[in-house]
Image (tube, coloured by chain):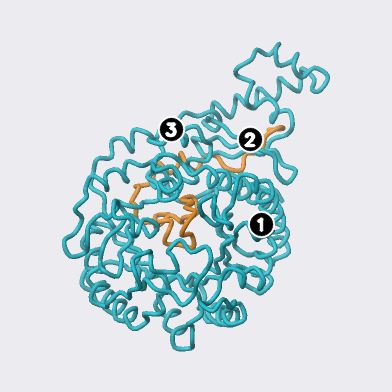
Chain colours: A cyan, B orange
Amino acid sequence: MKIHKFKQMDMNIVIDVNSGAIHVVDDIVYDLVDTYNEKSVDEINNIFEGKYTVEEINEAIKELKELEENGMLNTEDPYKKMIVNDNGPSFIKAMCLNIAHDCNLKCKYCFASEGDYKGGKKLMSAEVGKKAIDFVIENAGPRKNVEVDLFGGEPLMNFKAVKEIVDYARQREKETGKNIRFTITTNATLLNEEIMNYIDENMGNVVLSIDGRKEVNDRIRVRYDGTGIYDDIMPKIKAMVEKRQAGKQYYVRGTFTRENLDFYDDVMLLADEGFKEISIEPVVLEDKHPLSLRQEDLPTIFEQYDKLADEIVKREKEGKGFKFYHFAIDVNGGPCVYKRISGCGAGFEYVAVTPEGDIYPCHQFVGNEEFKLGDIYNGINKHELIKTFKNGHIYNKPKCMECWARFYCSGGCQANNYNFNKDIHVPYELGCEMMKKRVECAIAIKAKLMEE
Amino acid sequence: MKHIKTINMGALKASIAKPGCKECANSCQSACKTSCTVANLECENR
C-alpha cells in the first residue's frame, strides 16, 4: 500500500505512506488519486462524466503527477535495506523496574493480577534495584540516555527502596556520564507532601492513573473492600500536577473499557479539571473478559475519537488546548525512520526487571517463563530470543507491510501480538483498528490547525 | 497548486539524513504501557 486516503473534519486527506508526505486535496483529486496512473485518461473521463469536466480532470492529473515527480506521492519504500543490513549489537538502555509486585488496589482490568503478576506479592529490595541500575548502565553501551520507569504493582508501596535506588543511580550517573531519566507510574493513593516533592524533584515524568468520571473510575479502580478511590485520588493528582515545575512532564492516564465506551466524557472531565497532559487508553483483555473491547464496539469508539478530535481543535483555537497522548503525533518531526522501523524496542532495547531480579522483554511478558531472558546477576542467557525481538520489525510482519500506518505504530505491541495470536509477528487486530483511527485523527487535527 | 495543499513534504524520508542515534525514549516508557505508538516519541537529535 503506497497511499492512504480518508475524510475527516470536512477535509480530504491523502498520505503518501513511504515518504510521510501529507496532502489536503479537493474532491476531484480525492477521487482520482488511487486510479489516475492505472487507467487511461479516456477511461477516467468516462467514469467521471457529468461529475467533473475533462479540463478539471486533466488539471488534477497534472498536479498528481507533479507530486509524484517530487517524491511526495506513490513513493517506494527505501528503508528496508537499512534494517536488514543492521546486524550490529543492540543495547539495552530502557528498563521497567517492577519496584513492587503488590498493590493496594484491586482494579478489575489489571494485567498484572492485582500487582503480583501471578508470582506472589513481593517488594523489590534496594539491593536488587541497584544491581538492575548497574545492569542497564553496562548494557547501554554507547547510548547516553538511559530510561528507568519505576513500575509495579504500586511502586510507592516501596518508597524507601525507590529513594535508595534513585540515589544510587545519581551517583552512577556521575561516574559513567550517562543521563538517567526516571519516570514513575502510580495509582496516586499514597501521594503525600513528602512523596510529591520527591517525585517532582527526581522524576522526569510521572504517570498518574485515573479513569475519568467518578462513577467510571470507581466501578473499576477499587480498594480490596470494593470501595472506589476517586475522592481520595483526585485532590492528590491535582496537587501533584500543580507542584510539577514548568517544563516537567506528567500524564494523567486512564483506561477505557466496554463499560465506558463513551470515554470522550472521561477525557473531557480530566481536561475540565485543568489537566493539560491526558491519556485515556483502550483496555487490552481477552475477549471473554466482561470489560474487554470487541469488534462490535469499534463504531462507537471511532465516533468518540472523532468527537474528541473536533473538540481538541476547537479548544486549541480558543487557547484552551490540552495534549491527548494518542493524538500527539508531530507530523513534521517525531522519531526518525531508523526508530520507526525498529519498533517499540521490547526485548532488545527495553526490558522489565522483577523484584527477584529476573529479566523479561517488557512488563507485559513478566511472569511468562518462556520469555525470561535471564537475570541481573548472570545477565542475559537467551540471546536467540533477543534476536527474535530485534527482528520482530514491520518488514517481518506481513500484515504490517500491507498497512498504511506501519511507520506510525511501528508494528504495535509485541506482547499484545503474542497474547492474542501466539506470535509477535501477527498484529493484534482490534488494536490495529483503533491505532489507525487515532493516527487519522492526529493527522486531521494537525491539518485543520495548519489550515487556519 | 489549485487542487492540492501539501502540509508535509515527506518528513519521514527526510529523516534518513539523521544519524539514527537511537537515543530517543522507548515508547512504553511514556504514558503508554499497552498501546505502543512509536510516532508519538520525540527526536533527541533535532
Do tags 3 and 2 sit on the same chain?
Answer: yes
The label number, if any, that marks residue A261 in the structure image: 1
Q: CA distance from mark 1 to mark 3?
A: 31 Å
Q: Which class describes the residues within 10 Å of circle 3: few (<14), some (14-19), or many (20+)?
A: few
User: Secondary structure beneath disc 3?
Assistant: helix
Q: Quadrant of residue A379?
A: bottom left
Residue shown at the point (65%, 64%) measured from the top left: A267
**Which residue matches tag 3?**
A398
At x 37%, y 81%, the residue is A159
Tag nearer the camera, 1 or 3: 1
| Whether label 1 touches label 3, CB < 8 Å | no
Residue at the (64%, 60%) spot, across then down:
A259
Q: Element type at marker 2?
A: strand
| Quadrant in the rendering for residue A350 | bottom left
Give the Cα separation between the discs numbered 1 and 2. Answer: 26 Å
Residue A79 image offset from top left, x and y in percent: 39, 35
In the rendered image, the vertical position of residue B26 relative to residue A167, given as above or below: above
Q: Amino acid at mark 2?
A: Lys
User: In the image, residue A339 lies at what x, y percent?
Assistant: 39, 47
Q: Is residue A444 above or below residue A315?
A: above
In this rendering, the label closer to the viewer, 3 or 2? 3
Q: Which residue is mark 2?
A: A5
Seen at 63% across and 49% down, the residue is: A441
Contact flag, marks 3 and 2 (Cβ < 8 Å): no
Chain to which the residue tagged by mark 3 belongs: A
Name which of mark 1 and mark 2 comes first in the sequence: 2
Quadrant for residue A279, please give it. bottom right
Question: Left or right: where does residue A90 sit relative to residue A58?
Answer: left
Earlier in the chain: of badge 3 and badge 2, it is 2
**Amino acid under disc 3:** Pro
